[in-house]
Image (cartoon, rainbow, N blue to C red):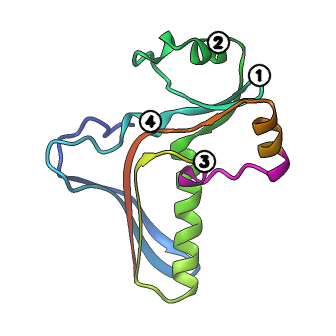
Amino acid sequence: NKYGDTPSPFEYNAYDGRVLGKRVMVSLVQSEKEKKLLGRAAFNEIVVHDGNILGIPKGDEGLSKKELIAEARRKGVPTGIRYIDSLAAFVASGIEEAVESGKKEFIMKRAMTSTSGEINIKVREDVLRFITSENKRIDLRGPVFMMVRAQIE
C-alpha cells in the first residue's frame, strides 16, 4: 500500500531471505509505464452477505451506490481476507513449490480477476450449489494488476 502510487516502471523488493534452505528474493513489479504498482481491487475485502460472497472496495470508489454493495458494507460479515492477502498466500506456496522442484524463478501475474480461483479462493462444492440454488452470487471481480517475481539461488 505504501508504494501504490509510485510512478512506473517500478520494482519493490519485498523479501530477501531463506526459504527451505535457498536464498529467495521476492519483488513486486510494475513494468508498464505510467501504471500503479497494484490495481484498485487488490485491497478489496471479501464479505459474505445474504448468501452472496462479494469483493468490497475499501474506499467509496463510486461502488457504494450499488445497492448490494452498500448493504453488504452495513450488514455483511467481513472475512478479514483481502484479495492481496489471498494472493500473497498463493505466492508463498508457489515459491515453496518452486524451491522444492529446483526452479530458479517463480512469477505470478494477475490482471482483471473474474473468478474466485484467480485470487486463490476456493469455494466448497456444497456452498456453490447453495449459492446457485438461491440465485445468489459470487462476485470477486476487479482490477488487481499485480506481478510478483521471485529469484531463487
Residue located beneath label 3 in the image? 116
Q: CA distance from mark 1 to mark 2?
A: 10 Å
> Which quadrant is the C terminus positioned in?
bottom left
Which element carries disc 4, helix, strand or loop? helix
The type of residue carrying mark 3 is Ser
The label nearer to you, 3 versus 4, is 3
The type of residue carrying mark 2 is Glu
Apparent side of residue 131 relative to residue 148 in the rendered image (left or right) = right
Question: Residue at 50% across / 38% down in the picture?
Answer: 141
Q: How many marks?
A: 4
Q: Which tag, 3 or 1, sits closer to the chain's start? A: 1
Q: Residues within 10 Å of mark 2 (few under 14, many from 20)?
A: some
CB-based contact (under 8 Å), mark 3 and mark 4: no
Q: In the rendered view, would you say 29 is above or below 136? A: below
Question: Residue at 50% across / 45% down in the picture?
Answer: 114
- Report the span colored magenta: 117-126
CB-based contact (under 8 Å), mark 1 and mark 2: yes
CB-based contact (under 8 Å), mark 4 and mark 2: no
Residue 41, label in figure: 4
> Which quadrant is the N terminus positioned in?
top left
Residue located beneath label 2 in the image? 71
The type of residue carrying mark 4 is Ala
